[in-house]
């Protein structure tokens, strides 16, 4: 090799985290800090422009995640202000759908990494006898 290169390891990722901010402090929000995994779905509607028709349309987006709690920030109490309570989680599992199509699945604990239907860790699982 004529020089240095940096390359990733097939299907391995650094720590992934997600944070949720709340306007108010609630018992339900603090319960998310219990030392157990939480299965959550995040859903959205994304506006896109269709250049062929010249019209805007919406596309559904869904992210399904398995999360473990990392941090709880209770926020602050001020008159007529949101508390900005925040939960931070480690992402153990992620499956992403765009317009009803599964485009990504990452399951760190089970050696699963699928991009657009291609399971790039299948051979690794086979090699390990999993």
Image (tube, rainbow, N blue to C red):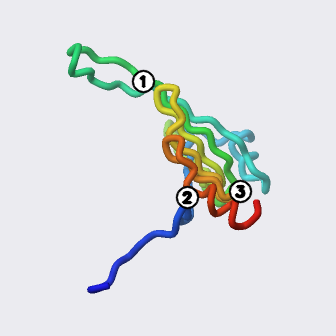
Which callout, 2 or 3, points to the residue nearer the camera? 3
Left or right, 30 with respect to 87, comes to: right
For residue 88, which quarter of the picture?
bottom right
Dot 3 surroundings within 10 Å: few (below 14), some, or many (20 or more)? Answer: few
User: Which numbered disc, 2 or 3, marks the residue that appears first in the sequence?
Assistant: 2
Query: Do residues under tags 2 and 3 come within 8 Å of each other at their CB atoms?
Result: no
Query: Which residue is labeled 2 in the image?
Result: 16
* Residue 89 seen from this side: no
Query: Which residue is labeled 3 in the image?
Result: 110
Q: Is 50 drawn above or below residue 105 in the view shown?
A: above
* Residue 98 seen from this side: yes
Q: Is 55 drawn above or below residue 66 in the view shown?
A: above
Query: Which residue is labeled 1 in the image?
Result: 59
User: Which numbered disc, 3 or 1, marks the residue that appears first in the sequence?
Assistant: 1
Quarter of the image with the N terminus is: bottom left
Q: x and y percent of residue 9 in the render? A: 51, 69
CA–CA distance between discs 3 and 1? 30 Å
Q: Which residue occupies 49% across, 41% down? A: 116
Which callout, 3 or 1, points to the residue nearer the camera? 3
CA–CA distance between discs 1 and 2? 25 Å
Q: x and y percent of residue 78 in the render? A: 53, 45
Quarter of the image with the C terminus is: bottom right
User: Which numbered disc, 1 or 2, marks the residue that appears first in the sequence?
Assistant: 2
């Amino acid at each position: 090799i004529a020089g240095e290169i940096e390359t990733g390891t097939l299907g391995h990722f650094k720590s992934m985290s997600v944070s949720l901010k709340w306007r108010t402090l609630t018992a339900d929000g603090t319960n998310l800090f219990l030392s157990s995994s939480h299965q959550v779905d995040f859903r959205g509607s994304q506006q896109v422009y269709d250049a062929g028709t010249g019209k805007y349309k919406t596309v559904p987006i869904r992210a399904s995640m398995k999360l473990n709690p990392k941090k709880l920030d209770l926020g602050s109490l001020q008159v007529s202000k949101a508390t900005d309570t925040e939960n931070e989680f480690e992402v153990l599992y992620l499956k992403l759908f765009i317009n009803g199509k599964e485009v990504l699945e990452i399951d760190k604990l089970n050696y699963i990494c699928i991009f657009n239907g291609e399971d790039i860790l299948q051979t690794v699982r086979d090699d390990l006898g999993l």
